[in-house]
Amino acid sequence: MLISRNFFCSHGNPGKSYFLTILLLSISLASCFAQQSKFPEGVYLNIEQLKNYSPAFQADLIVTKRSEEDINNHKGNDYIIEPNPNAPAISRKTIRNKIFAYVKQDSIFLNAAQFDIRTGYALALTCGNNLVFKGCLPKEDSEIMGIQESVRWVKAADTTEPVRWVKASPQDRLLFVLCIRPYSIRELTQNNMLIRLKENQYLLDEFNAEEDQSSEHILIYYMDLLNRVTE
């Protein structure tokens, strides 16, 4: 099963500079094939194996995108991965608790439980050193809460009451970025992006010129660009 998606997120803004257009074209031509083969297919059990592009073993697993009803009833992230009855056995327990990431064709699935972001798998929206994904809200006592900035999912605009995580919908999602080198995981926000783009002054200038720097589309777009110019 192939979960189709594009590693490159098109901006669609006609006001972008000619130089940026040329930059994108050159980057795309140079890396389009490399990007799709960046991480070989297989099961990765830890971050070191991702760093080395070296899966622990091959496995033909079944990937299923969960329905809204299933997420509402059981919570967790957007994908489940299950053993394939027609392939060599791998236990559900291993899939739930031991696998760090699973790569199938051009799709990278990250085990959210490895980051204490509840259960299930999330699809990476970029490929490279920075893997952006949408994950459900962490538990209130999760360690990642210490670096989570956004409260827009759970706090009404017309209230000053403290955030109550229990009122969040099971379908609410935050944008996260997993940095492979050096290893870190953060919520992907405008502030986080500004820090990361200090590595590239041109992209930083372009990002600062954006009208809506906090939109998911813009954040994914520039993180994808950063992956490509730092390859």
Image (cartoon, rainbow, N blue to C red):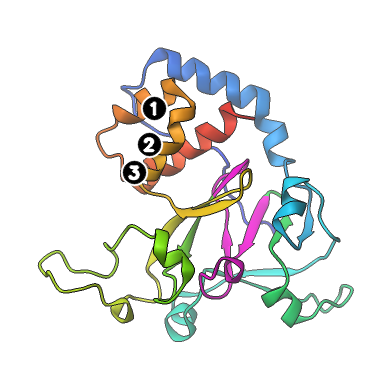
Density class for disc 1 (Cα within 10 Å; few <14, some 14-19, many ≥20) is some
Mark 3 touching mark 2, by CB under 8 A?
Answer: yes
Give the answer, above or below, for where 140 lies relative to 7. Answer: below
- Residue shown at 58% from the left, 73% from the top: 120
Give the answer, above or below, for where 224 lies relative to 21. Answer: below
Question: How much space separates mark 2 and mark 1, taking CA atoms?
Answer: 7 Å
* Amino acid at pointer 2: Leu
* Amino acid at pointer 3: Gln
Marking on residue 20: none
What is the residue that sits farthest to the left in this orientation? Answer: 158
> Can residue 48 be spotted in the picture?
yes
Q: Which residues are magenta?
A: 107-131
Q: Secondary structure at mark 2?
A: helix
Density class for disc 2 (Cα within 10 Å; few <14, some 14-19, many ≥20) is some
Marking on residue 194: 2
Density class for disc 3 (Cα within 10 Å; few <14, some 14-19, many ≥20) is some
Q: Is residue 229 left or right of residue 101?
A: left
Q: Secondary structure at mark 1?
A: helix
> Can residue 9 be spotted in the picture?
no
- Residue shown at 60% from the left, 29% from the top: 230
Residue 7 in the image, given as x and y percentages of width and height: 58, 41
Mark 2 touching mark 1, by CB under 8 A?
Answer: yes
Tell me the residue that label 1 is attached to.
Answer: 204
Q: In terms of sequence position, does the residue under pointer 3 or pointer 1 come before the other?
A: 3
Q: Is residue 106 left or right of residue 131?
A: right
Question: How much space separates mark 3 and mark 1, taking CA atoms?
Answer: 12 Å
Q: Which quarter of the figure has residue 31?
A: top right
Residue 24 in the image, given as x and y percentages of width and height: 52, 23
- Residue shown at 72% from the left, 46% from the top: 51
Question: How much space separates mark 3 and mark 2, taking CA atoms?
Answer: 6 Å
Tell me the residue that label 3 is attached to.
Answer: 190
What is the residue that sits farthest to the bottom in this orientation? Answer: 73
